[in-house]
Image (cartoon, coloured by chain):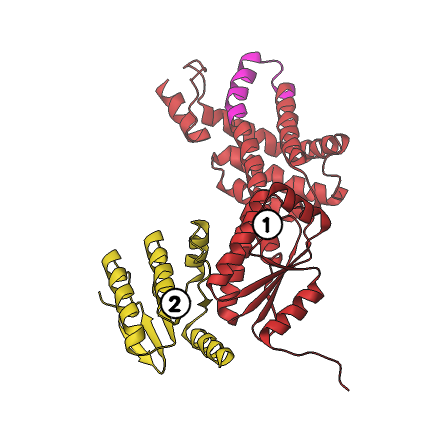
Chain colours: A yellow, B red
Amino acid sequence: MQVPILKQGNVLIATIQAALSDADLLELRSDLVLQVVRFRSAGVIVDVTAMDVMDSFASRTLLEISHMIRLRGAATVIVGIQPEVAFAMVQLGLTLEDIPTALDLEEGLAYLQQKAKSIN
Amino acid sequence: MQRTKGALREAVGDTVRPAVAPPLHEPTSELLRELVAHLRQNRTQLREEWVERIAQAQLLTAMTQEEIFAEATSVYDSYVAALETGTFEALQAYARNLSERIIPRGVETHEVVGIVLLLRDVLARSLFAKYQSDFEKLNRILDAYEPAANRIANTVAVGFVQERERVIRQQQEAIRELSTPVLQVRERLLILPIIGVIDPQRARQLTEQLLRGIRTNRAKVVVIDITGVAAMDATVANHLVQTVEASRLLGATVIVTGLSPEIAQTLVTIGVDLGKMNTVGDLQGGIEQAERLLGYKVGALN
C-alpha cells in the first residue's frame, strides 16, 4: 500500500493509513527524500496515528527518514503515536532519540511554524 | 445397602461416604430427620447454650449480646434447615449476607469459624446426652450428622472469606483509582503528584493514565511530582525514565520535581541514566519552568 504524500504550503504531510510492510516503509522513505527538495519543503510530517504496532524496523526507518531529510535541508516531525504504542516502543528501547514528536497533525504543523519563525 | 447409599447421597450431596451402617438399620435420611426433630424440639435451650459458649470463648466481641442472640437464632435455623434439606444454597446466601453485615464491624475470620464450630460441638454434645444409653444408635446418628455439619462449617467459612476478599479487592481498586490523579492546572499543562509506594503494577498504571491524560488534555508539558515518594528502586526508576520517553513520543515534555536527597543518592548509586530527565527541585519551580516552556508569563499585578 502506498502512502499518500500531501503538500501543504512548505510542509509535506505523509499520513500512514494502515499497517505497512517493510517494502512500503522503504518506498515511503525514498519518496519523501526525493520530494522534499523537489517541492522545496521546509518540513516533513509523518502521521502514524493509524499504526497500532511499531516494530524495530518501522522505528529505524522513521529514524533514517529523519536523518536523511535533515541532510536534504528540512526538518521531520513524527505525529500521532498512540499512548500504548509509545509505551511499547520505549520498553523495546525504540525511543526515536532526537526526532521531534508531536501529539497530532495540528501540533506538528505548529511546531514546524515555530521553528521556521525562530530561524527567520 | 443400596437404599442406604442412595439416602446418603440425597442427604449430603455428592459426598458419598462408605456406608458404615449395617443394612438392617434405618437409612441416613431417616436418622437426619430424627436429628432435625430433636434440634427443633430443643431449639431454645440449645441456642441459649450456644450463645453462652460464644460469650465464654469471647468471640464476636464487636457485637452486642442482643445482636449475637438474633444472629445466633438465624444461624441456628439455617443450620437445621441445611441439615434437613441437604442443600446449602440458602445457608450460603445467608452466610454471605451475614459476612457483608459484620465485616465492616471488624469481625475476624477465626471468630466466624469459631462460632460455627461451637454450634457443631454444642449440638454434638446434646446428641451424646440424648443417645447415651444406645451407643450403636449414637454412632449411626453421628455418622449422618458429622459430614453434614462439617460441610456446613466449611460453607460458612468459605462464604465469609470470599466476602472478605471481595471487600479487599474493592478497596484495592478504590485506592488504585484515587492514588493516581492526573490534574490539569493550565491549558496544556498537567500535574501528576505521586504519593506513597510505587510498585511495578502501580508504576504501569501511572504511565497508562498519564499517557491517556496527555492525549485527552492535549498537554505539552507534564510535571511529575514525587515529593511524596519515600524510596525508589532500580525497576521503578527505569520505569520513570520510560514514562518520560513515552511522553516525549506523544509530544509532551516532562519535568520531574521533588526528588528527595535519599532518592537522588540511590539513583546515582545504582546508576540509573537520568540524563534524559528534566528535573527541578520543587513543585513550584517545576510549574514555573513549565509555564516558561508554554510561553506564560506570570507576575504580580502592578
Magenta stretch in the rendered image: B129-147
Front: mark 1 or 2: 2
Q: Nearer the viewer, residue B284 or A98?
A: A98
Quadrant where the N terminus of chain B is found in the figure: top left
On screen, residue A86 versus residue B239, left or right, reads left
Q: Is residue B286 above or below residue B105?
A: below
Task: Give the chain letter at badge 1.
Answer: B
Q: Which amino acid type is marked by label 2?
A: Arg
B130 falls in the magenta region: yes
Q: Quadrant of residue B21?
A: top left
Residue B178 % position (x, y):
62, 58
Q: Nearer the viewer, residue A44 or B171?
A: A44
Dot 1: element:
helix
B161 falls in the magenta region: no
Q: Which amino acid type is marked by label 1?
A: Gln
Give residue A87's mark: none
**In percent of the image, x 71 and y 52: which residue is there?**
B260
- Residue hosting label 2: A70
Task: Give the chain letter at badge 2.
Answer: A
- Contact? badges 1 and 2 (CB < 8 Å): no
On screen, residue B232 versus residue A70, left or right, reads right
Dot 2: element:
helix
Q: Is residue B63 above or below residue A14?
A: above
**In percent of the image, x 37 and y 57: which residue is there?**
A59
- Residue hosting label 1: B172
On screen, residue A41 versus residue B116, left or right, reads left
Q: CA distance from mark 1 to mark 2?
A: 50 Å
Residue A78 % position (x, y):
40, 66
Quadrant where the C terminus of chain B is found in the figure: bottom right
Instruction: Give the crowd class for mark 1: few <14, some 14-19, many >=20 residues within 10 Å.
Output: few
